[in-house]
Image: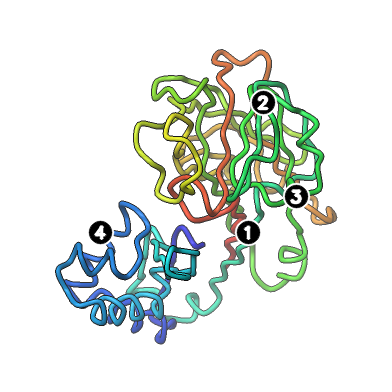
Amino acid sequence: MKEEVSLNLNNVEQVTSIAKALSSATRIEILKLLDERAMNISEIATAMNIPVSTAALQIKVLEEAELVVSQPLPGIRGSQKVSGIKVQKVHIDIKSNGDNASKTSVVQVSMPIGNYSDCHIEAPCGIASEKQSLSSDDDTEAFYLPERTTAQIIWFYKGYLEYRFPTRHIKRNKTNKIKSVEFVFEACSEAPGYNNEWPSDITIWINDKEVGQFTSQGDYGGRRGKLVPEWWPDSFTQYGKLYTFSITEDGCYVDNKLTSNENLSTLWSGKQEFISFKIGVKDDSKYVGGINLFGNKFGDFQQNIEMRINSY
C-alpha cells in the first residue's frame, strides 16, 4: 500500500485516472465509507442506496485509479470481494512539470512485520497472523518460528525488532541525489487487553545508532480496527497510529519533529548492503508501556513497514 502519492503534471495517465475517480460525488461518498472500514460490494450498495451493479462499476473506477484495493475473502456463499482504502493522501504539484520534475524519484520497499532479522523480546508478548495466533501467552520462543513471517500483529513489553532493508536502490541511483529516507509504520502501546491512555516511549535505531524516540499515548481499542479479522476479540488491541520517521541531511524526525542530529551523511557510508531499522522499547525509558506493530491486514492502515527513498 502507498500511504501517500506525490504526482506532477508529467504523470499524465495517473493524474487523469485519479481526477476521473474523484470527479464523481458517488465515488467520493464511497471513499468516505471505506475510510471507516473495508466493505464488500453489497454493503456499499446498501449503504449508498444504489444498485449492486452501480456500486461494482464505481469500485472498478477507484481501483483503476489505485485509490482502492480489493481482494476476495471467503464467505457463506463463496468468495466475496472486499474493498478498502489504498491511499491516504494524494498530492499533485501543478508547478512541477518542468525538467526538475522529470528527475524526481521515489522508491518504496515494503517490509512485512514478520520479516525481522533479529529480535530481543520480553513478555508480555505475542504474535499472530491474519488467520490465527502463532504463540501461546508470553511465548518468547515463538518469535523464532519459521511461520513468524506471516505475522500481521506483533506485541511485546520491552526489547526490539530489527528489519534490514536492501540498499541496492540507493547504490544504483547514481544520477540523483538522495533527499530523504523515510520509514512509515502503524504502531501503538501495549497494555493488558487495551487501554487508550497508556503511554509508551518507543525508540528507533538506524544502523545501531539511536536516532529517535516518540511517545505513543495509548494501546487503542474500543472499536474494531478497519482491517482486523473476525476471529480477533473485541477486548484486544484493535489499531494504532501511522508514524513517519525521516532521515534528511538536516537530521532525523518523527512526524516532522526533530529527534536526532544524525543525518544521511552520518548514517549512510554508501557501502552497506542494508539499512538496519530497529524499533522497540528500552528498559530505562520514562514510559515503559510496550509496543504493538501492525501489518497490512491488521489495524487501520493497509500497509507493512514501508521504506521510501526520495531523490531528485
The residue carrying pointer 4 sits among few (fewer than 14), some (14 to 19) or many (20 or more) residues within 10 Å by Cα, namely few
In the image, taking residue 141 as reference, residue 305 lies left or right, namely left
Q: Residue at 59% x, 64% y: name it.
A: 311
**Residue identified by numbered label 1:** 110
In the image, taking residue 61 as reference, residue 234 lies left or right, namely right
Task: Look at the image and tell me whether residue 249 can be seen.
Answer: no
For label 1, the SS is strand
**Residue identified by numbered label 3:** 275
Across and down, in percent, residue 188 comes to: 50, 33
The residue carrying pointer 3 sits among few (fewer than 14), some (14 to 19) or many (20 or more) residues within 10 Å by Cα, namely some
**Residue identified by numbered label 4:** 32
| First of labels 3, 1 by sequence position | 1
Q: What amino acid is at disc 4? A: Lys
Looking at this view, is 167 or 251 the one in front?
167
How far is the residue under mark 1 from the one under mark 4?
26 Å
In the displayed structure, 123 sits above or below 83; it is above
Across and down, in percent, residue 310 comes to: 57, 61
For label 3, the SS is strand
**Residue identified by numbered label 2:** 137
